[in-house]
Image: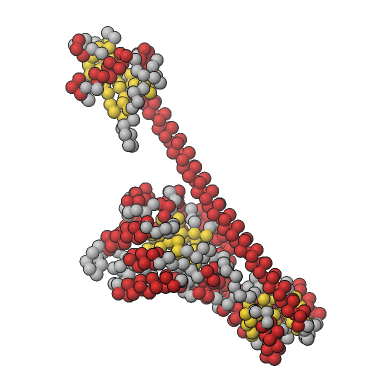
Amino acid sequence: MNTQSERAMSQTDRINTESPGPATVPRFQTHWNLVSGQLVAVELLWQGEILDGLDACGHPLRERQEAACRQVATVLDGHVGDVRLCLPLEWLELALPGTVDDWLATLAAWGLKASLLSVLVPERRAATDGKALATTLMPLRAAGVEVILGGFGAGASSLSELRELPLDVIRIDRAVVPDIVTDSHDTSLTRSLIQLVHGLHMRVMADGVTHDDQLQRLVDHGCDLAQGDCFGAAQTAEGLHALLHAGASMPQGLLGTRPRRRTLLLVDDEAAILSSLKRLFRRDGYHILTATSGRQGLELLASQPVDVIVSDQRMPEMTGIEFLREAKRLYPNTVRLTLSGYTDLQSIIEAVNEGSVYKFLTKPWDDDLLRNHVAKAFEQSELAAENCRLGGAVHRANRELIVANQRLSRMARDESARRLAMQSAAGASRDALDGLPMAVFGIGEDGMLAYVNRLAVRQWPEWSSALGGDPAPSMLQLLTALGQPAQRSDTDGLCTAINGRNALVWLHQVPGQKKPLGHLMMVQLLEDAAVAAPDRLA
């Protein structure tokens, strides 16, 4: 972290130490973007406590957690930049009764827009309840909520199940992450999981990152997001305010965005040769590491990034080719050279055919020639790193475009479905009005005649002909009479004579979301009714 954020961390650590336990004071874990180095989300830590219980002070836990979320919403609203609040799906289901729309409405009332929300889904739900889960998640994601699947890599969900779920981020379980630096098998597993998730056009988050070595290796493997103790202790709502105010960010050196010092690893079982090589390359300004065996060389590779390796061939326990073969498997971006006094053809063939070495050089060496070969190797390494960086940027941009296109497609489908539903409802309404045993006229708020049903066209052609314009004078006279509450009854209607025909007339306002849409006037002829009084004639 930078200096300001470290100071904020120390302050919030003190707050956390003095505060009661996690069951009484809600805490939040930060999510970090490993590309930009920025804080992108805060997650409510919830281990399934009983929401209807009481905390140590006698306050309901549900109210305490809801109040904390409201407070965080206020903090995030005042922060420059998009920082999401991540809420566990199970917490939403227990704390916010009702449908998904009800959840979104409640959260919006707290000040949390859907576009600034994330939902964390446990992996076991995907394995046991995939179809019902998809039904819940689809409207959330369509509204703009980010969906994160947690616990990947340690559960029983299959890839086919994951493909059926509307997911944005897959979080690698913390059980997979800890040995990423020291265990070659876990390193390969983590890299494979990252590549697998990227192949599904989703982003990857690592959970439980505890130190910078793990973080650096995750960055090297192209991981997108991370969370864990490496970024500081879990925060209270008050602590988050201090953290965001300090402008916390990851050190740029961990992100690979700044050129680091060229690092050269020399491996030889003879100390005198290592000393000679160090003196030779010191003038070139390299950061030089030395190892007296292949095993020691692998340990150095695991502890810090290396650009170029120069290794002897004949060494005890592990030959140079065996060492470089393992280095290539675990750290394929390194450029590897062999420097050997034994030029047996078989060794050269193995090194070249397996692609383990960039150059095969012989002892004794020419100083200028060796320095030139190593300088070219560094250029090759930097070119490959730049290609990898650009390729990663293009790949991330493509993934984001794919996700955006998928979301836009779903929104378009939803909008099309809504439009069809509205058209269907409008058609059904027209059919219902056409089936009424009375004439129906629709008058808009602007006073224009906007609708007539079939019976209105048949019984009142002189009025229906004004459709799309101002009503006929006789119709306007009737509307004026209906506009006087004393002249009509909402239930019995107005009994009047229209052009010598007796009729009952009703006028009802059509409500809208913000203001009335207009009025419906319904006219029913009374063939046997008495003629209305003269003062009530239209």
| Numbered disc total | 0
Residue shown at the point (55%, 76%) measured from the top left? 181
Describe residue 129's horizontal placement relative to residue 491 as left or right.
right
Q: Is residue 48 above or below residue 361?
A: above
Q: Is residue 174 above or below residue 157?
A: below
The foreground one among 457 and 218 is 218
Corner quadrant of residue 88: bottom left
Visible residue check, residue 262: yes
Residue shown at the point (63%, 82%) measured from the top left? 289
Give the x, y percent position of residue 533. Answer: 19, 11
Give the x, y percent position of residue 403. Answer: 53, 52
Q: Is residue 454 above or below residue 428?
A: above
Q: Name the residue furthest right.
A: 345
The foreground one among 405 and 414 is 405
Q: Name the residue furthest top.
A: 500
Give the x, y percent position of residue 412. Answer: 49, 42
The foreground one among 133 and 203 is 203
Describe residue 188's horizontal placement relative to residue 93 as left or right.
right
Q: Name the residue furthest front.
A: 283
Describe residue 359's horizontal placement relative to residue 391 as left or right.
right
Quadrant including the C terminus: top left
Residue shown at the point (53%, 71%) measured from the top left? 254
Give the x, y percent position of residue 247. Answer: 43, 65
The image's colouring method is secondary structure
Visible residue check, residue 269: no
Corner quadrant of residue 58: bottom left
Q: Is residue 183 above or below residue 67?
A: below
Residue shown at the point (42%, 70%) measured from the top left? 5
